[in-house]
Every structure is written in C-alpha cells, then in structure tokens.
Amino acid sequence: MGIKSGGKIPRSIRPLGVVLLWVVAIALLVVMVFPILWMLLAAFKTDNELFLNPPPFFPRKPTLEAFQYLFTSARYMRMMLNSYVLAIMVTGVGLVLASLAAYGFSRFDIPGKGSILLVTLVLQMFPGVSLIIPYYNIMRSIGLYDTYAGLLVADASFVLPFSIWMLKSYLDTIPIDLEEAAMVDGASRLVALVRVVVPLTAPGMIATGTYVFLSTWNEYMFASILTRGGDFAPITVGIGEFFGLFTVRWSQMSALSALASVPLMLAFVFLQRYLVEGMTAGAVK
Amino acid sequence: MAGYLFVAPAILFLAAITVYPILNSLWMSLTSYRIGRPINPFVGLSNYAQLLGDERLWNSLKNSFFLGLFGCAVTIVLGVVLALLLNSNWAPLRVREFMRGVFIMPWIVSTTLAALMWGLMLHREGIINSYLTRLGLLRDPIPFTGSMTFALPAIIVIFVWKVYPFAMVMILSALKSVPTELYDAAKVDGASSWHQMRYIALPLVMPVLLTITILLFIWGFGHYDLVRVLTGGGPIERSEVVSYYLYNVAFLQTNFSYGAAISMLVFGILILFGILYVRVYARSKPWG
C-alpha cells in the first residue's frame, strides 16, 4: 500500500509550516526509534559503559563479549531454536486451519455464519490471562505441560480468530468465477482450492503468515507459565528471565535481544507491506 | 453441507480450547482447590464473596483501568497525529513511505524486548536520568520502574510505544479510503482545511477510531507482560494490574480457585466491553 492520496497542503501552512512539519516528524521519528537503537548499541558495550554519566552514544571499545557468552550458552541457543520451531509450527498449523475456515466462510452459506464470525472476533480480544489457569491445569493433566505441543495449542488459540478474519476478507475480494470454471472442467473443490485459489491468495497468506509468526515469536505469557523455563521455552522467556537475576546483566540481555530481533526486523522490511495491506483490507473500502 | 467441513476444524479447535477452559475455570471458582491439597470440595460462592472485601483486588482493578484508559487515550492521539502526518503531502511520497516503515518498527518488538529497551533507558543510572539531572530538571536520579509515583506511568509509556503502530496503520488506511473527490468538491465550495478534516475525514474515519479505541482499552486493561517483567506489580502493589494479581494468586500463592474467581470477574468485565465492541463494530463494520 502506498501513501498515494492525501490532502493537499493548504496555502496557509506553506512554507514555514512545511519546515515545522519536517522538524516534528524527525523529532518523533528519533524518539520512537531511539529505544531500538540504544538496545542494539548496548549489545556491543560493557555494563560499566552503559551506565556512565553521561553514557557514550557509540561503544568506546566495541566488544563481542556478550555475544560470545550467548553463543557458547547451550541454554540460550536452545531457546532461540525453540522460538523458531514454535513460530514455524504455529504458522503452518494456523495457516492450514485458518485458510480452510476462511474459504468456508467466504464461499458457503453457513447458517449462523454472522454470529460465529462475531464470536471469533470477540474471542480474539480477550487477554490470554483469563484462560491461563485452566490451560495450566489441562496441560498438566494431559501431559502437555512444558512441551512444544502444549504451547502450539495455546498460541494457536489466540492467533486463529484474527487469521480467519484476515484471510476471509482477502478471499472475499477474489471473484468466485475462476474456481467455478476449474470445477466445470472437472476439478474437485479441493483441487480447485489448491490449484486456483491458493496461488491467488498468496499475498493474503503472506500477510497472515507474517502476523502469526510475529505473534507467536513475541508471545510471553503462555510461554512463561506453560513451560518449566528450559528445554521448551522460547527466547522471550530467556529475556524475561534476565530481569529476575540479582544483578541484571544488561549487555548480555541486549545481545540476546539483538540476536532475537534483528533477523525479524530485516525480514519485516520486506514483509510489512503485506501485513499492513492484509490487516487493513476491510478498513479500506 | 460442504461448508461445514471447511469451517469445522478451526471452529471445533477454537471451541475446544476456549469454551471448555472457561467452563473448567467456572467450576474451579466454585471449589476450593490449591496445588498440593488433596480434595476440592464444592464451596459455592464463597470465593466470589471473598472478592468483594479484597482491597488488593480493587487496587489492581484500578491500576488496570488506568492502564487501559491512559494507554488507549495517548495511543489514539499519537496514532491520529502520525497518520495525519503521513497522509498529507508536506514531504515527497518516498520520504513518507520510508518514515512509515520506521514508525512501524516497535510493532515487531516483543513486550519482553520492549521492557528491556526501556528498562535500560529508565534505569537509575540510565540515559534518561543522566540527561534530566545534567539539564537540572531533576536533582536526584529516579529509578523509574521502582518508584511509587512513576512505576505505573512508566508501564503506560512503554505500552503506548508498543501499540501505537497498530493505531497508526489502522487510522492511516482509513484516512486513505476517503475519496479525494470529496476534498476537491469541498474546496470548490470554499471549505477550509480544518472544515475538510472536521466534516469529511472525521466522520469517515470515526468507525475505525471507535473500534480501535475499545480494542486498545481492552488490551491495556488485560495487559500482563510488562508488569510481570519490569515491576512485578511493585513497589507495594503500586503497579499491580489485575492480570498480574491473578497470576500472583494462582501461581505464586497457588490458590487456583480464588484465581479462577478473579478470572471470571475479569471475564465478566471484558464481556461488557466485548458487547460494546460488537455493537460499535456491527454499526460500522470497519473490518469488512
């Protein structure tokens, strides 16, 4: 989505106004990005340097100590792996379930469709904390506590509703004629779905996939309560755990955060267009 | 009939992992169940009676309400300002698209990461204290997240930083959906830019604004992560929100039944906002 339209600047705010807007925009930009920059720089500093008064902006003697510690720590590397495994699994399962449901809602007249969709919309806004006690009990009693499967189920519960909505509003924009043509030619509905609809919905799938991946990657509450904190906990738990230490190791924590976030940020530079389009598909009429 | 087959897996899955746990939670709230105790006898509504006299609960509800209210209000204002900024042509399109790409970045930062980034800056010896004292605005550095006055405001600031991109993106796309012909027509009629905004853009953006306002309030009200990681509800419960209190009761004090009663209360409160949300949504259908 480009920023194509937009009101013309009224005569009254030129040119002093334009200068002012530049100043405001750049000031806001700096304020909003500074926390991220500061964390990335902190990863290359020592803890002493972080809390000098005033703190130097760039590390005086850039050091990779913090990274070295992390790369040799089996525990944190395992958590990083867990994050990828979980995010990929939830994205896979979520996309399959959500795209089937979205297709059903978009193409069939299902009695009570409106209410079912509204209920899922309401579900997605409830904070996970209202479900955490029964989740913990159930996971413990069926042996899913501290497993990938347990977290997969919990995470899927909060990404599925919005995924269904995103994909459904995307599917609604694709004309039904194409599948019908394929079915007239003798393809079954499922074949038509896989051969014709899936390729056409690729941008919507990318958008939904990005949403699910990010939400799972960033999830903390379920992960911190439904795992023991070691073998199956994702990296968010690892970062949260640093805060509990008697002396907080800020530069190590920053390095861990940088490792966890930089790959995502780079990917997001390319993917954000899809996500923004997908999330606002309905809002732009 | 075939429609059901497509919809069934996701809907059955959702029902299984929401409806059953809610019923389970309801049942638990009527019993007395603590980890490590053998039987869970039925105790009726006594857990609910205990809610009424629990001052710590009311304090946490008040804090949650503040987080929801201020978190949502500041986010909406910031979202509107940024969306307007990105939508008017004071700078070349490419520059504004680049800016949108940068402004959106906090969106992908997890709450634990946001807690770390801001914790680093708000630290007693961190950059914010360093400059505030050097500029003479503060006499002594304040450990913000450990301060009676500033712990909850600090959480609100970080919460806003984390969610404003969502508001910005939603409002921006609503602004863009306003047909330019409407502005042109208004200009022909001599409408000022303020009038164009007030009478053309605002009414068309209103449905999206209302919907995300309710959504943001609910997110703020139910927020848990930042409190758990940064303050643990402290100092002296000054920043304890209801989600964290619930966690504390159930998992630290291991009183599951009372925790379940609290979660039913939270659930009840949010159902009210959920109904409001659905009504606003049904009237305007901002999500198509």
Image: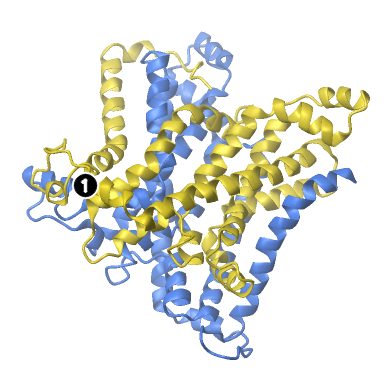
Chain colours: A yellow, B blue
Compare residues A212 and B220 and report the one nearer the observer.
Answer: A212
Q: Tell whether B61 sits left or right of A70.
A: right
Which of the 4 image quadrants contains residue A177? top right
Q: Is residue B11 above or below residue B19?
A: above
Report whether residue B126 is seen. yes
Q: Chain of mark 1?
A: A
SS state under label 1? helix
Tell me the amino acid under the disc marked 1: Glu
| Residue positioned most to the top | B188
Compare residues A34 and B258 and report the one nearer the observer.
Answer: A34
Q: Is residue B127 above or below residue B267?
A: above
Which of the 4 image quadrants contains residue A204? top right
Q: Tell whether B154 sits left or right of A102.
A: left
- Location of residue A14 in the rendering, given as x and y in whole percent from the top left corner: 31, 12
Identify the residue at horizontal 23%, vertical 67% (top origin): A246
Assign the C terminus of chain A to one quadrant of the image: top right
Total of numbered circles in the picture?
Answer: 1
Report whether residue B118 is seen. no
Residue, disc 1: A65
Compare residues B269 and B187 and report the one nearer the observer.
Answer: B269
Identify the residue at horizontal 25%, vertical 23% (top origin): A23
- Location of residue B97 in the rendering, given as x and y in whole percent from the top left corner: 42, 21
Compare residues B150 and A246 and report the one nearer the observer.
Answer: A246
Identify the residue at horizontal 50%, vertical 19% (top origin): A2
Identify the residue at horizontal 46%, vertical 74% (top origin): B251
Q: Is residue A110 above or below residue B85?
A: below
- Location of residue B195 in the rendering, given as x and y in whole percent from the top left corner: 46, 22
> What is the crowding at mark 1: few (fewer than 14 residues within 10 Å), some, or many (at least 20)?
some
- Location of residue A40 in the rendering, given as x and y in whole percent from the top left corner: 27, 39
